[in-house]
Every structure is written in structure tokens, then in C-alpha cells.
Amino acid sequence: MKVQLLNKILEVKEQIKDWKKENYTIGLVPTMGALHAGHASLIKKAKEISDKVVVSVFVNPIQFGPSEDFNKYPRKIDSDVEICESLGVDVVFNPAAEEMYGKNKNLSNNDLTFVCPPYNYVDCLCGKARPGHFDGVATVVLKLFNIVRPDYAFFGQKDAQQLFILKNMVKDLNLDITIVPCPIVREEDGLALSSRNVYLSMEERKNALSISKALREIKKLYNDGIIDVKILFDTAVSVLDKHLELDYIEFRDFETFQPLKEVRENTLVAIAAKSGTTRLIDNEIL
Ligand code: PAF
């Protein structure tokens, strides 16, 4: 079957209604497009456990700050559709911003209903440097959930804070959806895949490799029995390339999101740093 490219919410809803009549389970892979092997792994997982798979491709304006890369963010709908087709996706949903948020809407919380995740989950890690970002993410994801009504939704562990916030949104708002976390996909040399990697020069990419190296080093020390966060933090700093502009290295309990002084099982170790002007994130769960 050829993949259907749909731009209108009503068209998607019609298709979903037909599938629900047949009792098909539906998997949703929300993306902002520029699909790479990381997204492909989410889609493959979705194909494995759901009867029908919808991939949304939407560069969501309300999750970008005024000085962020919304205009520059890579948009490649033709190749995204080709990739989805080759992976057996049923529907690519690629709405315009006006379709999602309505014409003539001011996309601020003066004029739009937002989902606001708890302060403790957003005022830290990436949320600290990107105020409002996770309100925008949670809002668009809830809208996508309401449009597609999926049984399963697939998110990469690379955006660990996003994954944590969305898992809690589903729980707190009693949504009947299973969030399926999917492991980080890396280049052979360890760089975590990201649509933003295309911005990196050769030199910046080389420097960025020290992020995954620092995480590997932390994991190695933890496996050797070192649990003191200060020691692990200092080790990571010493491994990170000096040309990177470090934003954070955080150690959080991945069940409660509380910061830790000593690492234990299910600790999220997350790093964010800029290589050149490109902000990169990566993490390990110990
Ligand atoms: O992870 C992303 O690509 C985006 O934050 C998401 C979940 C598609 C919401 O726009």
C-alpha cells in the first residue's frame, strides 16, 4: 500500500474512524521531519506492535523560542514521505501551522490554550535554556493524540526530558495511550543522531563526539562502582572538548526527576552543549 500524505485534520480523523471500525491498533510517531535512522527505528518499532502507523511531520512553531532555529530547521517533506513509504507507514500527517492552530491566532498563551507540565520537570535541563519549550511540546503532542487517537506513541530516549514529561502527561491526564520509549541511535563513532547534526561543520562534529565519549566514561566508572556525582561530573568535564560551550551535565532519578548526589539504578545522565552554534543533547540511563 502506498503511504497517504494528508494535510488536513479532518482527513486524518476520517481515516482513523475507518480503522477504529475495523478494530485496528494505531501507532503514532510524532516528528518534526528531516527523518533519519533514529526516526526510522521509531517507525520500525511502531510497525512491529501496531496494525496501522501514522507519522506526523510538523515543525511546531510554539516549541521554538524567538531566537531559536524555527525558520532554519530542515524541512524535507519529499524525502520524509519516501522514507515513510519504504518503511510501510500508512499515513504521513503534514499539517500547516494554520491547520493546527487556526488562522489569525497569536501563538502565545494570550490566545491559545496550552498544556503546562510541572515546573519541577521543565525548569531544569533543556527547559532552563528554552523557556516555554516543553509547554509547546506537550501542547502539540496532546493535539496530535486527540487527532490520531493512537494506542501507542513512540518517542526517542535521546530527548529524555521530553519523554519523561510526556509519560507523565499521559499519566496525569488519564490518556489511554501507551508511550513506547525507543533507544538512542548513534553513528558508528558514537554521535547521537539528530536532525540538527546537518548544521555541524567537520570540526564542530569532531568536537561534538566528546559528548558521547563523556557519557561512556561515566558509564564505565559507574560500572566500576563509582557513584559520587561530583567525581562523575568532573570526569565528564575533563573529557568534553574545550571548544564546546557546555550548558549542563545533570544526574536525575528517571522515575521522579529529582537531582541526585549519588548515582543509582535508573539514573538519567544528560549533557547539553553547543558545538559552534548548534545545541546538542545526549544522555545515558544507568
Ligand atoms: O521530538 C520532536 O521531534 C518534537 O518535540 C515532537 C515530539 C515531534 C513535538 O513537536
Image (cartoon, helix red, strand yellow):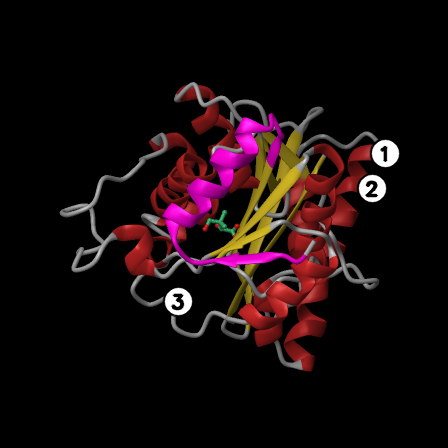
Q: Is 16 included in the stretch rendered in magenta?
A: yes
Q: Quadrant of the C terminus?
A: top right
Q: Which residue is mark 3?
A: 70
Q: How many residues crowd around disc 1 within 10 Å: few (fewer than 14), some, or many (20 or more)? A: few
Contact flag, marks 1 and 2 (Cβ < 8 Å): yes
Relative image position of residue 233 (x, y in whole percent): 64, 44
Relative image position of residue 221 (x, y in whole percent): 80, 39
Looking at numbered disc 2 in the image, what kind of residue is underneath it? Lys
Judge from the rendering whether residue 107 lies leftward or rightward of residue 37; answer left or right.
Answer: left
Eye-nearest disc, 2 or 3: 3
Please tell me which residue lies in front, 181 or 149. Answer: 149
Question: Is ligand 1 within 8 Å of the beta carbon of the residue shown at mark 1?
Answer: no
At a point 65% along the width and 36% down the height, the residue shown is: 181
Q: Quadrant of residue 273?
A: bottom right
User: Which span of residues is magenta-colored?
Assistant: 2-26
Under circle 1, the secondary element is loop
Q: Quadrant of residue 222?
A: top right
Q: Looking at the rendered structure, which numbered label has been put on residue 10? A: none
At a point 74% along the width and 60% down the height, the residue shown is: 86
Please tell me which residue lies in front, 279 or 13. Answer: 13
Q: How many residues crowd around disc 2 within 10 Å: few (fewer than 14), some, or many (20 or more)? A: few
Looking at numbered disc 3 in the image, what kind of residue is underneath it? Phe
Looking at numbered disc 1 in the image, what kind of residue is underneath it? Asp
